Amino acid sequence: MGQTLAEKVWADHLVRKGQGSEPDLIYIDLQLMHEVTSPQAFEGLRLAGRGIRHVDQVIATEDHNTPTVDIDRPIADKVSALQISTLEKNCKEFGVRLHPLGDADQGIVHAFAPILGLTQPGMTIVCGDSHTSTHGAFGALAFGIGTSEVEHVLATQTLSLKPFKTMAINVEGKLPEGVSAKDIILAIIAKIGTGGGQGYVLEYRGQAIRDLSMDARMTICNMSIEAGARAGMIAPDQTTFDYLRGRPHAPEGEMWDKAMEYWKTLKTDDDAVFDAEVTLNASDLSPYVTWGTNPGQGLPINSQVPVPEDIADAAKRQATQEAIDYMGLKPGMPIKDIAVDTVFIGSCTNGRIEDLRAAASIMKGNHKAKNLHRVLVVPASSRVRLQAEAEGLDKIFKDFGAEWRNAGCSMCLGMNPDQLTPGERSISTSNRNFQGRQGKGGRTHLASPQVAAATAIRGTISSPADL
């Protein structure tokens, strides 16, 4: 029997096959780190008198707790300042390469690594962060791990795991104009639910996926975790190879040729069998937006907020009512009638250069709606910020009335100064709309950069077609 892409990468990294109910032991090629989930791991090494097994296969950055303005000043929040300084001390002590705040290669952990060419097909990549699945866009098996596992990888460069199940997500046909990768993944999560991928590696396949750029593929894989999956993957192809060629950590010369030989084998065999399959028709998709309090509570933008009384299942009916109450919506109201206070464009989901270009192309020549408190545009990495400024995108955002910030996680999560106030409503290009995710009492609607930009112009949830 043939193998799926995930099974091939797993087999290539198998150190020891588990006997009976034992887990396998697999080799880890790259560990990414940031300030939030690393302190306990370093302390564990210190207490045990251990060093790092392969320090050249570990790299760190500062992203979650970092401010996005006044980065040359001391960090005001004491907890954030402590976490940042602790990471810097730990990296210096253990010899870990670090891209700190202000460094040209600093950025969100899942954005800076692909730009540097650290993320490559066929690798196993881990990080103490759930959205490590982003790197699966390159055909890598990448997933988030817990703090104790972070320490284990540092000490041994291996991880004990039971093999994951596999699920094919087939997105056939061509996307209509105005529909993006963010709409694909929101539609998938709405279809299978936030637990539909639990225990699986999702492999995204089909014409619509093959047609996507690398930035767009990273958006898709990034939100695999929001469907409950352990990882998301896309088979590498010419688009992948073109993206990697010439990047700082990409192979060169003869090593590039050898890498290409291997990378081209990283595709699911024709006779491989997935544990589950899901199919979507890309031509049926339209811009999606979430109305509720989890990424699976999303609908096409021309839809209405659900009416709980119309839902037969008691548990779903109650969950819908609770989400509507928290979000301050009226059952049956058109989604396009929802007015927002804040627009956030950024995060490891949609803070890459193509996302900023898409938003800027819609904002250009316009100005933010009068009812908006603010529009934040936050590049996912310093390299993206520099490229955007070289292309003049920052001027478009500023002329529009948006705030142009430094790289970081920013308003994706309430761990830094960029937070919503209680009751404040945002449309966000990030990945989670949980209660309080962007700040205590904040209300979040997830959408693509295109929808966020159109909403910033009209003040109510809108698509570019509404302009």
Image: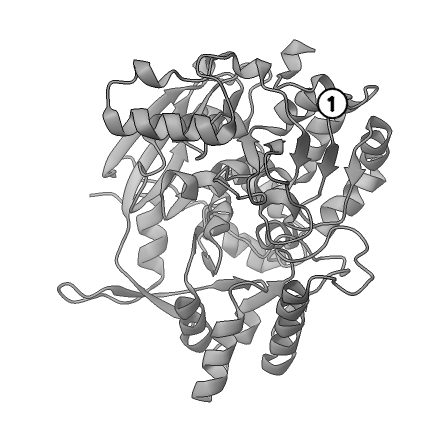
Q: Is residue 343 above or below residue 331?
A: below
Q: Is residue 190 above or below residue 167?
A: above
Report the side of 70 relative to 342 (left or right). right
Few, some or many residues within 10 Å of mark 1 (<14, 14–19, 20+): some
Q: How many labels were placed on the picture?
A: 1
| Residue 190, quarter of picture | top left
| Residue 160, quarter of picture | bottom left
Q: Position of residue 447 (x, y in %)?
A: 56, 28
Camera-nearest residue between 428 and 389: 428
Q: Position of residue 183 (x, y in %)?
A: 51, 25
Q: Position of residue 143 (x, y in %)?
A: 42, 53
Q: Residue at x 41, y 76 (%)?
A: 156
Q: In the displayed orientation, state which residue is furthest to the left.
A: 20
* Display colour scheme: one colour
Q: Residue at x 44, y 77 (%)?
A: 155
Camera-nearest residue between 64 and 249: 64
Q: In the displayed orientation, state which residue is furthest to the bottom.
A: 49
Q: Is residue 229 above or below residue 116?
A: above
**Dot 1: what SS?**
loop
Q: Quadrant of the C terminus?
A: top right
The residue to which callout 1 is attached is 371
Taking the image as drawn, is residue 212 in sight? no
Q: Is residue 21 above or below residue 447?
A: below
Q: Amino acid at mark 1?
A: Asn
